[in-house]
Amino acid sequence: MNEQDCLVRTLGLVGVGMIGASIGLAAKRAGLVRQVLGCARSAKTVREAQARGAVDAAASLQEIAAQADLIVVAVPMLAYEEVFAAMAPHLRADACMTDAGSTKRLAVEVAHRHLGAHARRFVAAHPIAGSERSGPQAARADLFVDRPCVLTPVQCEPWALRSVEGFWRALGARIAVLDPDTHDRLFARVSHLPHLAAYALVNAIVSLAGNEEPFAFAGAGFRDFTRIASSSPEMWRDIAIANADALTEALDRLRMELDAMREAVAARDAARLEAMFRHAKQARDAWLATQGERRA
Amino acid sequence: MNEQDCLVRTLGLVGVGMIGASIGLAAKRAGLVRQVLGCARSAKTVREAQARGAVDAAASLQEIAAQADLIVVAVPMLAYEEVFAAMAPHLRADACMTDAGSTKRLAVEVAHRHLGAHARRFVAAHPIAGSERSGPQAARADLFVDRPCVLTPVQCEPWALRSVEGFWRALGARIAVLDPDTHDRLFARVSHLPHLAAYALVNAIVSLAGNEEPFAFAGAGFRDFTRIASSSPEMWRDIAIANADALTEALDRLRMELDAMREAVAARDAARLEAMFRHAKQARDAWLATQGERRA
């Protein structure tokens, strides 16, 4: 990897929420860019990103398409269609594009539908660096350091792939490559399903509580378990819809497991409950052990 | 509260896992006890608790019943029956009892069934100081500091209630009082339901993965969300059965919420999904805000 491959004169951020603004901060800290242009649906968000130092100047989608060497799309999944359609007529033939969305089948499909030949320089990406926080205030220059970034390139120019890969790597990310379908199936399980389960759990507790304080005596376990239920409703609404097929399959499986547990609880079936709990504990502890090794 | 009320010559710990051993460490650090006797199903566990300094000497259930001024039962819920039955014939008329179990209806019911007049000196307690870890190795002298401890006294001698309350307070706990039914209903929601949901979620993911690595690319959200799935299967098996009625009601409600979400995902109903997610986020964020105030 030649260092010049990841040098960008003008970086264009489409969407400057927590992820977009973190990309701006990280790229500037790494000395990768001379100028960062940013746009967002709300002018206030762009001003906040400027105040954080993540963006140098506000720009329109068309200006970003016409001026940026590298464009990063970091908007909710269901806004991709509008964003790609608006940029397409203005794109330069030497600019690369990437994104930071949580589902990749839709990202690739929309790019190929709207960008024509430009789609060969769009390298879909998913940096695994979420948090329940949102907005430019929550941005961090070190958000991507030592975190995986999954690329799902489809029919990309080799030089564009090298360039985008180098960019994410220069932000500190560890690169992995998957096809979009595999990506979406994996993340339906370990990310999208847990988020929906956390939202559903909180709603169930509120509903059970009626007029009582729903979370009286909730402890640390509850706080951690429901942390992701504080995530952006707009972002997760779009992820759920963009990955609806894999997600409904995952929800059906969770329902089967919960039904089996409910049956065992109602039957006071101690052996069956213990076996189910032990199965889960062993699987999670085994995973945790590999995480410890990787961090070490 | 007279300081002598919470001074104990001999503390008897029935069960010296994470909670029991933490009680021993905390009582010794606070200078509340001269001697701590401990028993557990496995001699190895008692030796580990002794090595940690949580227990001075191993003793049988009968010896603890005959010698201790204060007895703390810290065993899985379904072992209460055997423990109370074995101690009953040997108990002193001036000894108090408490416990650390996560369900209180069963604790009170078993005590009243087996202890006769001694039950008037049993003050059921639930220190909210769990962790996914277990065993004496995980014990901490400060485990109860600033944590709630819920007492559910039923037909207790006032002096026994004062004495047990003083003991938990001296370990650092903040005392709350509830009736056993209310306790079990509240904890089915904020503690027992999340634990079962976490176990079910991990099992669903493992099952969906088939022969693939189930937790590839799982991030911080997943780690926190599933932390409680590493909890003791034996302990949670017993809690689920001891609180089966309230827990099945809670599981049914969670299922309704998940079914509604599944339906909205399958229908790509953006407005409905966003409303459900926002409802959960607002409820959790409002709770979190009160937590911040309480800590301050």
Image (cartoon, coloured by chain):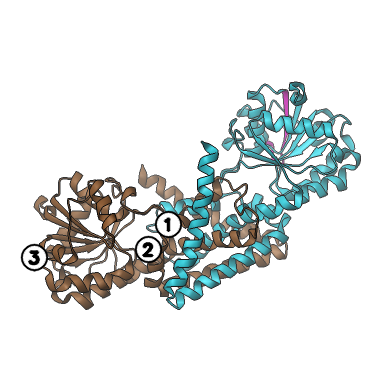
Chain colours: A cyan, B brown
Q: Work out whether disc 3 and disc 1 sit on a shared chain.
A: yes
Residue shown at the point (34%, 49%) measured from the top left: B138
- Identity, as a three-letter code, of the amino acid under mark 3: Asp
Percent x, y of residue A132? 56, 46
Q: Residue tagged by mark 1?
A: B231
- Residue at mark 2 shares a chain with residue at mark 3: yes
Closer to the camera in the image, A234 or B207: B207
Q: What residue type is labelled 1?
A: Ser
The residue type indicated by label 2 comes to: Met
**C-alpha gap between disc 3 and disc 1:** 36 Å
Q: Distance between the residues labelled 1 and 2?
A: 8 Å
Q: What stretch is highlighted in magenta?
A: A34-43
In the rendered structure, are the residues bearing label 3 and label 1 in contact, judged by CB atoms less than 8 Å apart? no
- Asked whether residue B227 is drawn in magenta, I would say no
The residue beneath circle 2 is B235
- Say which of A6 and B1 sits in front: A6
Asked whether the viewer can see residue B98, the reply is yes
Horizontal relation, residue B157 to residue A264: left or right: left
Please report, as a chain letter, where disc 3 is located. B
Q: Quadrant of residue B89?
A: bottom left
- In this figure, which residue is indicated by the disc labeled 3? B94
How dense is the environment of label 2, judged by Cα within 10 Å: few (below 14), some, or many (20 and up)? Answer: some
Q: Residues within 10 Å of mark 3 (few under 14, many from 20)?
A: few
Residue B108 in view (yes/no): no
Instruction: Indicate the secondary structure of the residue bearing disc 1.
Output: loop
Looking at marks 3 and 1 on the same chain, the residue that comes earlier in the sequence is marked by: 3
What is the x, y in percent for residue A126? 69, 43
